[in-house]
């Protein structure tokens, strides 16, 4: 009898160990899957393809970005179109002051026309530094008018507004100062949220100190022009944003395709969930149309 009891106890212990092992394996497997999902990245090839059909618009700060891109290699980010010019501003663009306008194929143009001539499908804009002759609210009005002009001529282009970069503590002007720049960025971020195919990318906050001024280590002239380390931060933040955007759009598109194939309530619900996460965009509108057209199986 004692021997039988001992055998039963041994079996119980063995089953307990096996159960614990199975549970641990399941957890490890789940963690691995989650880890793999978290590690999913946009390939350099796909990223370069994305940026190849883009244009960058900006002033002397954008010109510095152009030089930074060139120093990274011949085909960095697919070699996008650079529509940048020193002293470029909303005023110079509006009044067609040829000496300080962006150029495409050597010809001075208003940005809206240069973007159209370049035939790009997305544009990254960093402006404002040369426009602070008044407060952030007034510069915002000029920025908004500028974007409307671009959108009118280029209705299908995707627009990314890159936050206006800062100035150092020792160069706080009456209008061009950290407070007004922060206000402009705040207004632009809200504006982008309200409009389709318009995104705001914070490329500059990591360059600022606790008081909101540009750190001296990131200023090439102790003022507002940037060092390579600053452009590195800028580029990393930009890529992080667009990679995330591409992944979300890919996931949503795959979910909609799956829902169209299965036509089940569960698949449609999952598709709606992922599409809802997208910001206002043509992609989101088109996916929602496809979801509405799905006929659920009985």
Image (tube, grey):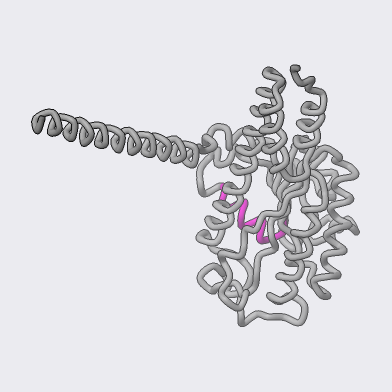
Q: Nearer the viewer, residue 43 or 95?
A: 43
Horizontal arrangement in the rendering, residue 15 relative to residue 71 (left or right): left
- Who's the residue at 51% across and 38% down the image? 41
- Who's the residue at 76% across and 64% down the image? 128
Q: Residue furthest front?
A: 1
Q: Quadrant of the C terminus?
A: top right
Horizontal arrangement in the rendering, residue 10 relative to residue 185 (left or right): left
Would residue 155 be counted in the magenta stretch?
no
User: Mainly helix, strand or loop, the magenta region?
Assistant: helix
Instruction: Say whether residue 83 is visible.
Output: no
Q: Nearer the viewer, residue 262 or 182?
A: 262
Instruction: Say whether residue 203 is visible.
Output: yes
- Who's the residue at 69% across and 32% down the image? 271
266 shown above or below 178: above
Which region shows up in magenta? Answer: 58-69
Would residue 66 be counted in the magenta stretch?
yes
The image shows a total of numbered marks equal to: 0
Q: Position of residue 76 (x, y in %)?
A: 55, 41
Q: Position of residue 10 (x, y in %)?
A: 16, 33
Q: Quadrant of the N terminus?
A: top left
Q: Position of residue 96 (x, y in %)?
A: 88, 55
- Who's the residue at 67% across and 27% down the image? 267
Q: Position of residue 131 (x, y in %)?
A: 79, 67
Horizontal arrangement in the rendering, residue 246 relative to residue 289 (left or right): left
30 shown above or below 107: above
Q: Nearer the viewer, residue 292 or 241?
A: 292
Q: Nearer the viewer, residue 1 or 197?
A: 1
């Amino acid at each position: 009898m004692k021997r039988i009891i001992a055998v039963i106890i041994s079996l119980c212990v063995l089953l307990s160990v096996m159960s614990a092992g199975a549970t641990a394996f399941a957890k490890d497997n789940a963690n691995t899957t989650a880890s793999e999902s978290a590690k999913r990245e946009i390939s350099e090839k796909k990223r370069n393809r994305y940026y190849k059909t883009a244009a960058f618009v900006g002033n002397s700060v954008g010109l510095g970005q152009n030089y930074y891109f060139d120093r990274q290699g011949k085909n960095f980010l697919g070699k996008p179109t650079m529509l940048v010019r020193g002293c470029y501003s909303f005023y110079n663009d509006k009044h067609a002051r040829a000496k300080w306008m962006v150029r495409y194929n050597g010809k001075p143009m208003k940005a809206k026309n240069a973007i159209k001539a370049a035939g790009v499908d997305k544009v990254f804009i960093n402006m404002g530094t040369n426009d602070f002759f008044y407060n952030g609210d007034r510069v915002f009005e000029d920025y908004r008018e500028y974007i409307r002009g671009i959108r009118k001529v280029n209705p299908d282009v995707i627009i990314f507004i890159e936050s206006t970069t800062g100035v150092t503590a020792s160069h706080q002007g009456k209008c061009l100062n950290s407070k007004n720049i922060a206000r402009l960025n705040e207004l632009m971020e809200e504006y982008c949220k309200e409009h389709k195919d318009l995104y705001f990318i914070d490329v500059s906050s990591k360059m600022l100190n606790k008081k909101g001024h540009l750190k001296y280590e990131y200023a090439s002239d102790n003022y507002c022009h940037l060092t390579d380390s600053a452009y590195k931060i800028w580029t990393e933040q930009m890529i992080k944003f667009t990679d995330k955007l591409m992944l979300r759009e890919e996931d949503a598109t795959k979910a909609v395709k799956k829902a169209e194939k299965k036509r089940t309530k569960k698949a449609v619900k999952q598709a709606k969930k992922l599409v809802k996460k997208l910001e206002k965009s043509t992609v989101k509108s088109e996916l929602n149309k496809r979801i509405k057209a799905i006929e659920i199986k009985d």
